[in-house]
Amino acid sequence: MLNLVIFGAPGSGKGTQSEKLIEKYNLAHISTGDVLREEIKKGSDLGKLAKQYIDKGQLVPDEVIIGMLADVLESKKDKAGVIFDGFPRTLAQGAALDKMLKEKKQEVSVVVCLDVDDEELVKRLLQRGRTDDNLETIKSRLEVYKNQTSPLMDYYEKAGKIAHIKGVGSVDEIFAKISEAVDKVQ
Ligand code: ADP
């Protein structure tokens, strides 16, 4: 069972590469951002709560995300593995993921980290133009990434699980490098 975490700043290409990985390795896709946007569309209580944070470029509180993830994970049992996209994003979420997988006698197989510099990230996000892709929100999301999410990198580094991939170049070039890293742990 492959448990792949795709990691990187907003705009680093996690979503694009996830789509290709899902197809190649027959994985279930768990994107916390997609789940939250779906809840917002439905107008659910969770969606209403999440929107307040997302619009400001802040993280949705850990307990909300962790509870939500446990439910989603339960619903994706019939694939060769899972790709976690946009989760974990804090050390608490990382610990919660380890615990959830351990209960199933599994673990994180590899963490693919897409490295892209800030200038390029801002450029890409402004082009994408999602409602949370305005300059003010983008700045806040990049700050949040540095302060709350990047400590996870050390955590996975110490566990020997991280594969750094340069996230600049053509989509296919980047995908080839990611595939190489994934094949090593298969
Ligand atoms: P990106 O990585 O491009 O910013 P996502 O679609 O992954 O986009 O997430 C969009 C927003 O949803 C984040 O800025 C955050 O507010 C919220 N979010 C998504 N995943 C998480 C998470 N694991 N923990 C907390 N908040 C999250």
Image (cartoon, rainbow, N blue to C red):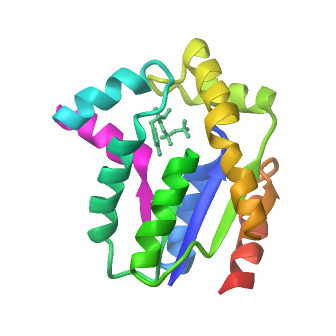
Q: Looking at the image, how many numbered discs can be counted on the residues? A: 0
Determine which quarter of the picture holds residue 5.
Answer: bottom right
| Residue drawn 41% across the image and 68% down it | 100
Q: Position of residue 46 (x, y in %)?
A: 23, 36
State the residue at coordinates (48%, 24%).
132
Q: Tell me if residue 39 is in the magenta stretch.
A: yes
Q: Can residue 24 be seen? A: yes
Q: Which residues are magenta?
A: 29-43
Quarter of the picture containing the C terminus is: bottom right
Q: Measuring from the top left, give residue 93's x and y in whole percent.
A: 49, 51
Residue 69 at what x, y percent from top left? 35, 56
Q: Is residue 11 above or below residue 23?
A: above
Q: Main secondary structure of the magenta part?
A: helix
Q: Is residue 163 left or right of residue 6?
A: right
**Residue drawn at x 70%, y 33% as measured from the top left:** 146
Which is nearer the eye, 13 or 95?
Answer: 95
Residue 172 seen from this side = no
**Residue 105 coordinates in the image, percent (x, y):** 45, 84
Residue 19 in the magenta stretch? The answer is no
Q: Residue furthest top?
A: 136
Res 159 quadrant in image: bottom right
Closest to the observer, 6 or 24? 6
Could you tell whether 65 is left or right of 125 in the image?
Answer: left
Quadrant of the rendered image containing residue 29: bottom left
Determine whether, in the image, residue 109 is placed left or right of residue 35: right
